[in-house]
Image (cartoon, grey):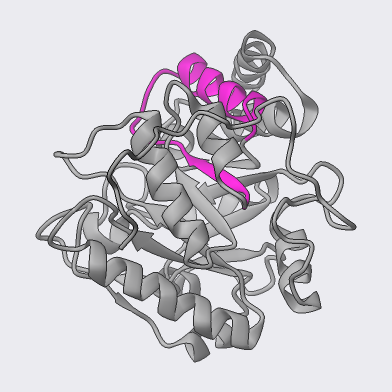
């Protein structure tokens, strides 16, 4: 273990000097194999290197919560507005039409409903990810939780090993337990650990000082939409994250629990891909909602 005596707090983030990319729009991905890049280019638009991911994997530990009781009715109609779908293999096989040409970020670990954030998860067989043509595999990492950190980091490391073998990118998903402080210092630690252990993408939460989290992570960061908030606030969250360097937004409840999910996902997409500011995107949401 590194000697922590006289440890210096991080401060040289070089926020005004973006990490260089060579021949590929996503940072930290220039030296990946062709198959990896091809899958990433399906998730992140080659035009701007950004992605609007639609998350509906909540049921794997939470059951049929509001908005995902019937994924065939609530989620499938929204797929045409998303760049990528994040879901479980069970829902993918049972509900998502195989004719739907959308890349899938497959939830590739599974736990129990006893605790909703920090489970003693296990990783699925990579061959199942191959069978469903996954564009990426998502694995939770519980940094800072004494009971589960070692197991979840090992899960990530294993997923990266098999992902590299078969050309499938891995997303490290930073979990946040009730005892963890949701600040930039924690998220810099959690995202960096994911990247250092080989994650090609990291999903985390937005926080004040987020630009330092992005700068210190050598691979693309996607933010989680988090709990349901008013539509204007969710659009503000997406705008701030993208403005401060996020490569995408993985939004679930703030889309499918919206008063008009189709209008909301289109407004979020306008923030990510068209540079809309929060007020412009919210006006778009209102206009689309009024015209339904």
Between 8 and 129, the one nearer to me in the picture? 8
Between 141 and 287, the one nearer to me in the picture? 141
Residue 69: in magenta span: no
Q: What residue is rendered at 53% in x and 30% in y? A: 212
- The image quarter containing residue 189 is top left
172 lies above or below 242: below
228 lies above or below 124: above
Between 216 and 47, the one nearer to me in the picture? 216
Q: What residue is rendered at 66% in x and 17% in y? A: 281
Residues drawn in magenta: 219-245
68 lies above or below 224: below
Image x and y of residue 122, in percent: 28, 77
Residue 224: in magenta span: yes
Residue lying at the far right of the rendered structure: 23
Image x and y of residue 39, in percent: 72, 69
291 lies above or below 238: above
Residue lying at the far bottom of the rendered structure: 127
- The image quarter containing residue 208 is top left
Q: Is residue 16 visible?
A: yes
Q: What residue is rendered at 31% in x and 50% in y? A: 175
């Amino acid at each position: 273990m590194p000697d922590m005596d006289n440890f210096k707090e991080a401060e040289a983030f070089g926020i005004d000097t973006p990490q260089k990319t060579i021949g590929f729009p996503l940072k930290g991905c220039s030296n990946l194999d062709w198959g990896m890049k091809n899958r990433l280019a399906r998730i992140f638009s080659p035009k701007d290197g950004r992605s609007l991911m639609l998350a509906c994997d909540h049921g794997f530990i939470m059951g049929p919560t509001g908005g995902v009781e019937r994924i065939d009715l609530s989620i499938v109609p929204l797929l045409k507005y998303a760049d990528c779908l994040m879901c479980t293999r069970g829902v993918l096989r049972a509900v998502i039409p195989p004719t739907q040409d959308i890349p899938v970020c497959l939830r590739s670990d599974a736990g129990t409903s006893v605790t909703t954030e920090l489970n003693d998860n296990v990783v699925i067989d990579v061959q199942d990810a191959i069978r469903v043509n996954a564009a990426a595999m998502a694995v939770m990492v519980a940094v800072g939780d004494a009971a589960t950190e070692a197991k979840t980091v090992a899960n990530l490391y294993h997923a990266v090993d098999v992902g590299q073998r078969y050309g499938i990118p891995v997303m490290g998903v930073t979990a946040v337990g009730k005892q963890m402080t949701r600040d930039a210092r924690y998220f810099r630690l959690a995202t960096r650990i994911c990247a250092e252990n080989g994650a090609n993408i990291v999903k985390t939460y937005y926080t004040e000082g987020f630009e330092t989290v992005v700068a210190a992570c050598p691979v693309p960061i996607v933010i989680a939409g988090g709990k349901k908030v008013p539509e204007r606030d969710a659009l503000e969250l997406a705008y701030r994250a993208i403005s401060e360097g996020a490569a995408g937004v993985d939004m679930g409840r703030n889309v499918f629990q919206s008063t008009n999910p189709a209008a909301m996902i289109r407004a979020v997409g306008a923030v990510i891909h068209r540079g809309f500011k929060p007020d412009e995107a919210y006006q778009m949401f209102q206009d689309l909602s009024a015209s339904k």
